[in-house]
């Protein structure tokens, strides 16, 4: 798993008593860095697709960059050089090097010296930089570079904790066989999606799917083939609904999907698309051909997720009994 994909790009969201790390600790580390280097500004900068975000800024009047600002990703700044090379950077006097002639930190804000080291996500990709800047030319000894490296490793250890915790959370809400949400994950995400739809007036429908005669598949072909059938159903369901819809496996051969519809008539269309997709996939593979019964219920103001699941399940059972007649 590429762990950086499951992290928020706004680390301020982690600043609450229940989080694994303390933004206050990171703030103290950045303040300490600036104090030890007698520098007017110190930063923890995160690289995102939107640009270079000042995640933590040292708390000094001499520091022109507050936490939260984002610098254009194409700007010729010191941090960009570190992210591109993955290596530490020490510029004792930027005015002596023409490569920094277009650096806004130098020519707009008056900085002359920069010392920064790369900070990495647990997967090895660049998180950003840990750095100090000075308005004067500097002459840092080798021990100073070793010091900033040691401090940034403390930050990386926190990132590793976040990565481990995020992966465990992901595992706790994901069905390992079908790679969709398990019951717990579905309930959590569905409740959030329902709350949003109620605020915005969106139309939601809950689909409840059950594989017909699935026990016969396991008995005749074995559980390995049965697992392949389950995986194909999960894949078709995920590929057919919209990316923003919520898909889950409740257990056994029962799947659910909370889908957004433009209007009531859209329900028949999505059911037909699912039926066609199941048939197409099975015709193109060697797995046994199965059919799927699909129940549904529209979301109302008063029902909670358990009531909705029960209603959709009852509708699915009615459809299954109709097939059996």
Image: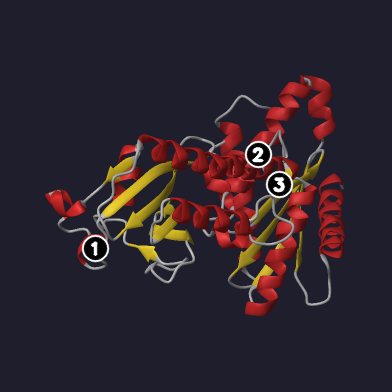
Nearer-N-terminus badge (1/3):
1
The CA span between labels 1 and 3 is 46 Å
Q: Which mark is residue 59?
A: none
The numbered disc on residue 164 is 2
Could you tell me which secondary element the residue under label 1 belongs to? helix
Q: In this picture, is 238 found above or below 10?
A: above
Instruction: Count neighbours of disc 2 (C-alpha within 10 A) and say few if under 14, some if 14 to 19, many if 20 or more.
Output: some
* Closest to the observer, 144 or 83: 144
- Whether residue 267 is situated above or below residue 117 in the rendered picture: below
245, 314: nearer the viewer? 245
> Is residue 243 at all visible to an observer of this figure?
no
Residue at 28% over, 53% down: 113
Provide residue 216's location: percent of width, then percent of height: 83, 28
Query: Residues under labels 1 and 2: Cα distance?
Result: 37 Å
Q: Name which quarter of the figure residue 144 lies in.
A: top left
Label 3 or label 2, whichever lies nearer to me, is: 2
Residue 106 showing in the rendered view: yes
Q: Position of residue 284 (x, y in %)?
A: 55, 31
Q: Secondary structure at mark 3?
A: loop
Quadrant of the snapshot with the N terminus? top right
Left or right of 35: which side holds 307? right
Q: Is residue 325 left or right of residue 77?
A: right
Task: Identify the residue shown where x is 61% and y is 47%.
Answer: 238
User: At 37% across and 46% down in the image, what residue appears?
Assistant: 116
In space, the residues marked 3 and 2 are separated at their CA atoms by 19 Å
Say which residue label 3 marks.
181
Structural crowding at the residue carrying mark 3, measured as other residues with C-alpha within 10 Å and reported as few (<14), some (14–19) or many (≥20):
many
Q: Earlier in the sequence, mark 3 or mark 2?
A: 2
Q: Which mark is residue 104?
A: 1
Q: Residue at (39%, 67%) from the top-left corner?
A: 63
Secondary structure state at the residue bearing disc 2: helix
Residue 43: quarter of image: bottom left
């Amino acid at each position: 798993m590429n762990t950086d994909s499951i992290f928020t790009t706004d680390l301020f969201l982690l600043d609450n008593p229940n989080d694994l790390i303390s933004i206050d600790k990171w703030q103290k580390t950045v303040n300490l860095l600036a104090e030890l280097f007698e520098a007017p500004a110190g930063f923890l900068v995160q690289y995102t697709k939107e640009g270079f975000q000042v995640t933590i800024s040292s708390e000094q009047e001499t520091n022109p960059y507050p936490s939260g600002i984002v610098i254009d990703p194409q700007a010729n700044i010191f941090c960009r050089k570190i992210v591109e090379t993955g290596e530490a950077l020490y510029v004792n006097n930027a005015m002596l090097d023409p490569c920094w002639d277009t650096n806004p930190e130098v020519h707009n804000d008056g900085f002359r010296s920069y010392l920064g080291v790369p900070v990495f996500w647990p997967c090895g990709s660049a998180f950003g930089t840990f750095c100090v800047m000075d308005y004067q030319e500097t002459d840092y000894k080798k021990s100073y570079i070793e010091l900033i490296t040691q401090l940034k490793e403390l930050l990386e250890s926190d990132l590793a904790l976040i990565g481990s915790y995020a992966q465990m959370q992901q595992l706790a809400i994901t069905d390992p066989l079908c790679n969709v949400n398990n019951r717990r994950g579905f309930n959590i995400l569905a409740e959030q999606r329902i709350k949003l739809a109620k605020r915005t007036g969106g139309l939601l429908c809950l689909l409840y799917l059950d594989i017909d005669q699935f026990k016969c598949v396991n008995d005749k072909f074995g559980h390995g083939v049965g697992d392949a059938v389950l995986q194909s159903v999960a894949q078709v369901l995920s590929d057919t609904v919209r990316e923003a819809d919520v898909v889950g496996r409740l257990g056994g051969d029962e799947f659910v999907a909370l889908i957004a519809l433009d209007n009531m008539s859209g329900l028949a269309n999505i059911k037909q698309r699912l039926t066609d997709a199941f048939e197409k996939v099975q015709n193109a593979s060697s797995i046994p051909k199965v059919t799927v019964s699909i129940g549904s219920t529209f979301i109302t103001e008063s029902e909670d997720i358990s009531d909705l699941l029960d209603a959709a399940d009852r509708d699915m059972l009615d459809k299954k009994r109709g097939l059996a007649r």
